[in-house]
């Protein structure tokens, strides 16, 4: 039986002591000399890369101080899936270490302010469902309840969509669907007998009605129902750009919400239909190699580029959708082909065998100060990085789902 256990001790600036056990063979070295074995799956290699670079999960993306942040929620949700697949406690402990760093003895999230109504705050909270089930630590349940309270009072557009943040009035961003809806669905099914399931479906309905581009079937990054913000189309309220990672966020929101959405509910088939619609659209808009662009509908634009986080998210969602039966089996074959293209296009190994993923779009947004106008050129001009969390997490998720 294959086993991989990791014991990490004495984290210093220059060295990490690792104990790796592969097929009962022990290899113990400092990080200065350690090379990851050639026979690792991409999922395990990526997880070890993250563990080596960020010994504490709050450090992800070079974060200098502990922060309750969607990026940690994204990466650690991938670790949770890897733990469920391998039963290796190091992955669970990495998640728990983050939760215990961020939640105080009274069950409050450090530096969390509900009045900001930041929908991103819901994403890390979904990690606490499993932690609470495993440990019965009531601090975790209290935080789950706090985030549910936020959603209960989250400001909404006139038609009922969650604002992305208090500082972005009347605006729905597609990333907000990923941040909130899987948590919202799991909570209401687990603790409320599903009373909010119609509201969950409503959030997706609004995206379908207002974010989806009629020409391509892809989703614009954001929509301002009031049409007042400077980036909004004066007729329909959408932002100007179909952002690749925005598509990825939306597709992941659908497949992870459907994990908890009851098949017997009247909205279930509707949500599956939304996933099939976007899957068909990304198929039509992929590159010849099977990947996706930063500005997804305009591959010919000067400076536009194949982008790794969006491609990884879409591959994961297609694979998971096919595995779960939401999508036809042909999408699994498409995901496999795109995954191979992904490795060829974006993935390298350093001299220690750790993963390097290139062409990750930097974080982008809309409005604010200085004002971000959301044009195609704004997204194309966003600097790319290596190994930013959205790409690492998306690659890890897709590798787990495809058993690569």
Image (cartoon, rainbow, N blue to C red):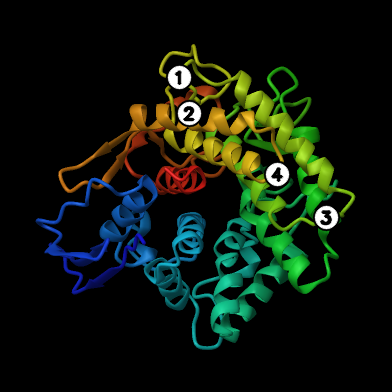
Q: Which residue is drawn at 79% across and 36% down?
A: 273
Q: Residues within 10 Å of mark 4 (few under 14, many from 20)?
A: many
Task: Report if the CB atoms under discs 4 and 2 are less than 8 Å apart.
Answer: no
Q: Earlier in the sequence, mark 3 or mark 1?
A: 3
Find disc 2 in the rendering and name its residue.
Answer: 338
Report how far apart the C-alphas of labels 4 and 3 lie in the structure.
Answer: 17 Å
* Circle 1 SS class: loop
Find disc 1 in the rendering and name its residue.
Answer: 289
Quadrant for residue 119, please give it.
Answer: bottom right
Task: Report if the CB atoms under discs 2 and 1 are less than 8 Å apart.
Answer: yes
Q: Position of residue 7 (x, y in %)?
A: 26, 71
Image quadrant in which the C terminus is located: top left
Answer above or below: position of 103 versus 151. below
Q: Residue furthest front?
A: 1
Find disc 3 in the rendering and name its residue.
Answer: 199
Report how far apart the C-alphas of labels 4 and 1 lie in the structure.
Answer: 35 Å
* Circle 3 SS class: helix
């Amino acid at each position: 039986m294959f086993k991989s256990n990791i014991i990490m001790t004495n984290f210093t600036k220059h060295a990490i002591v690792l104990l790796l056990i592969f097929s009962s063979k022990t290899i113990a070295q400092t990080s200065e000399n350690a090379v990851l074995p050639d026979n690792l799956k991409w999922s395990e290699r990526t997880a070890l890369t993250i563990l080596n670079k960020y010994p504490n999960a709050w450090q992800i993306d070079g974060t200098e101080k502990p922060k309750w942040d969607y990026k940690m929620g994204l990466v650690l949700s991938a670790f949770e899936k890897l733990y469920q697949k391998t039963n290796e406690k190091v992955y669970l402990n990495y998640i728990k270490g983050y939760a215990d760093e961020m939640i105080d003895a009274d069950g409050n999230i450090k530096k969390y302010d509900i009045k900001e109504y930041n929908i991103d705050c819901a994403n890390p909270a979904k990690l606490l469902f499993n932690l609470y089930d495993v440990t019965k630590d009531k601090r975790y349940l209290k935080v789950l309840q706090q985030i549910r309270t936020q959603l209960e009072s989250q400001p909404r557009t006139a038609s009922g969509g969650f604002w992305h943040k208090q500082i972005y009035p009347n605006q729905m961003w597609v990333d907000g669907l990923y941040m909130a809806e899987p948590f919202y669905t799991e909570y209401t099914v687990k603790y409320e007998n599903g009373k909010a399931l119609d509201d969950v479906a409503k959030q997706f309905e609004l995206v379908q009605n207002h974010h989806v581009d009629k020409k391509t079937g892809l989703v614009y990054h954001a929509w301002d129902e009031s049409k007042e913000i400077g980036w909004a189309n004066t007729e329909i309220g959408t932002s100007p750009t179909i952002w690749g990672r925005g598509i990825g966020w939306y597709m992941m929101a659908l497949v992870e919400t459907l994990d908890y959405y009851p098949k017997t509910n009247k909205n279930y088939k509707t949500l599956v239909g939304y996933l099939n619609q976007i899957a068909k659209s990304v198929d039509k808009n992929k590159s010849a190699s099977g990947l996706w662009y930063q500005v997804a509908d305009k591959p010919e634009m000067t400076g536009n580029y194949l982008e790794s986080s969006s491609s990884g998210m879409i591959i994961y969602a297609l694979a998971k959708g096919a595995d779960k039966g939401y999508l036809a089996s042909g999408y699994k074959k498409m995901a496999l082909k795109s995954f191979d293209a992904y490795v060829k296009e974006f993935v390298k190994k350093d001299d220690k065998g750790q993963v390097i993923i290139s062409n990750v779009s930097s974080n982008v947004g809309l409005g604010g100060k200085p004002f971000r106008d959301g044009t195609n050129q704004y997204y194309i001009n966003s600097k790319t990085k290596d190994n930013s969390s959205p790409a690492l997490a998306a690659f890890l998720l897709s590798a787990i789902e495809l058993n690569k």
